[in-house]
Every structure is written in structure tokens, then in C-alpha cells.
Amino acid sequence: MSPEDRREAIVHAALPLVIKDGTNVTTSQIAAAAGIAEGTVFRVFKDKQELLATCVSEALKSDVEIERIRKIDHDQPLNARLTESINAVREYLDRMWGVMSALRDTGYQPPAHKLGEEKGPPLEMRRLSEAVAELFADEPVRVKPEHAARLFLGLVFTNRMQGRGLGEVVAEPTELVELFLHGALKRGGNDE
């Protein structure tokens, strides 16, 4: 196995453990999950901090989700396409927030040089938004597809937030799409 493949395998084994234990995860736990000796971890990473930083970088990548969104069949109705996109975005958010929350809650501080490097939304979020915008491209939307995607993703993101002041209920993807496409007000007739 090449050093890069070994590195990737270690990070993928580490991510669920980092989500569960944050910085309290041990390199021996990670090695066991990866099926390697603990010393191998330190042949690939200079220390645990580098491994954790790499886990953060991996959690932020959205390549898999973007590929899923781009494979959505455009012959489906818009509501079906958007519902599929929510499922991909939801997996991204759960992974990213899971890693970041667990690390933050256990005292992790990202390297200072990584903070504030980008102006505006992070690159991976912009890439997700661009992929979702493609779902609106041939639709008679009131705003540009890019704007529709940004507003839609805002609804998806806030729906995943829970806790004090935000509620505990999370709407299902079909409910979110219905709300986004048709609004929150009842139209009369049987809806009232």
C-alpha cells in the first residue's frame, strides 16, 4: 500500500472514532480500527495533531456528495431532485458537524494558519451550492439558479441545527422541499 493510500485508510478509520471521542481518541484505538500497528500511524503522521488536522480536512471535503448530486436524474420533477440532493447534503453536514463538534467539545484548536484564510463561504460549501444550482438550471425560478440553491441550502442547513432555542424536530426532506417550493402559508380549500 502506498504511503498516500495508507494515510487515507488511517483517516477513514479514524473519522468515526473522532466523531465519537473527539481529541480523547487514542492512536492505539485508531490503529486497531485501521487494522495496523500503532507505530504505523506515526510513520504516516508526525503526531496526533497532524492526524486530527487531516481528519478535519477530510470531513470538510464534499467530493462524494457533489458526485451524488451531479448524478441525480434531471428527467425527474424538481421536487424529487431536490429531495435527493438533501440526502447528500445531510450526510455531508452530519459528518462535518460531527467531527467539528466532537473536537471542539474536547478542546481541539485548529492550527492558527487555517483560520480566516478564505473570504466568504468555504470552498466546499460553494462547490455544494454550485452542484445544487445545476438542479434549478432549466426551471422557471424567480431568481438565478445560484441564488435559489443558496436559499435552499440555507433551509437545509438550519433544519439540521438542533438544541437550545432551535428546537428538537427536524423536518423530513420531502417536507423541506414542499416548504421551499410552495411556501409556509396554506393556500385555502382542503389545506386549511
Image: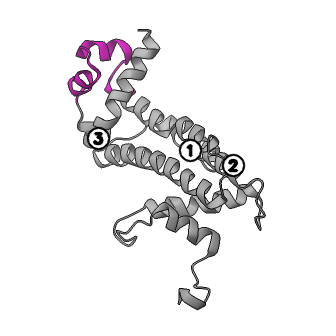
Instruction: Say if mark 3 contacts mark 1, CB within 8 Å.
Output: no
Tell me which numbered mark, 2 or 3, is placed earlier along the sequence.
3
Instruction: Determine which quarter of the picture holds residue 179.
Output: bottom right
According to the picture, the residue beneath numbered tag 2 turns out to be: 74
State the extent of the magenta-drawn residues as a range.
26-50
2 or 3: mark nearer the eye? 2
| Mark positioned earlier in the residue sequence (3 or 1) | 3
| Earlier-in-chain disc, 1 versus 2 | 2
Q: Secondary structure at mark 3?
A: helix
Could you tell me how many numbered marks the image carries?
Answer: 3
CA–CA distance in space, label 2 to label 3: 40 Å
* The N terminus sits in image quarter: top left
Q: Is residue 191 visible?
A: yes
Rounded to the nearest angstrom, the CA distance separating label 3 from label 1 is 23 Å
Q: Amino acid at mark 3?
A: Gly
- What number is the disc on residue 116? 1
Q: Is residue 152 above or below residue 112?
A: below
Query: From mark 1 to mark 2, how far is it between C-alphas?
Result: 37 Å
| In the image: residue 68, left or right of residue 78 | left
Asked if residue 63 is positioned above or below residue 182 in the image, the reply reads: above
Residue for point 60% across, 90% down: 188
Q: Which residue type does callout 1 highlight?
A: Gly
Please determine whether, in this image, residue 173 is positioned above or below residue 101: below
Secondary structure mostly seen in the magenta stretch: helix
User: Residue 36 at what x, y percent from top left?
Assistant: 26, 15
Who's the residue at 68% across and 47% down the image?
130
The residue sitting at 33% across, 22% down in the picture is 47
Q: Nearer the viewer, mark 3 or mark 1?
A: 3
Q: Which residue position is annotated with label 3?
A: 22
Mark 2: give few (<14), some (14-19) or many (20+) Cα within 10 Å. Answer: some
Location of residue 35 in the rendering, given as x and y in whole percent from the top left corner: 26, 18
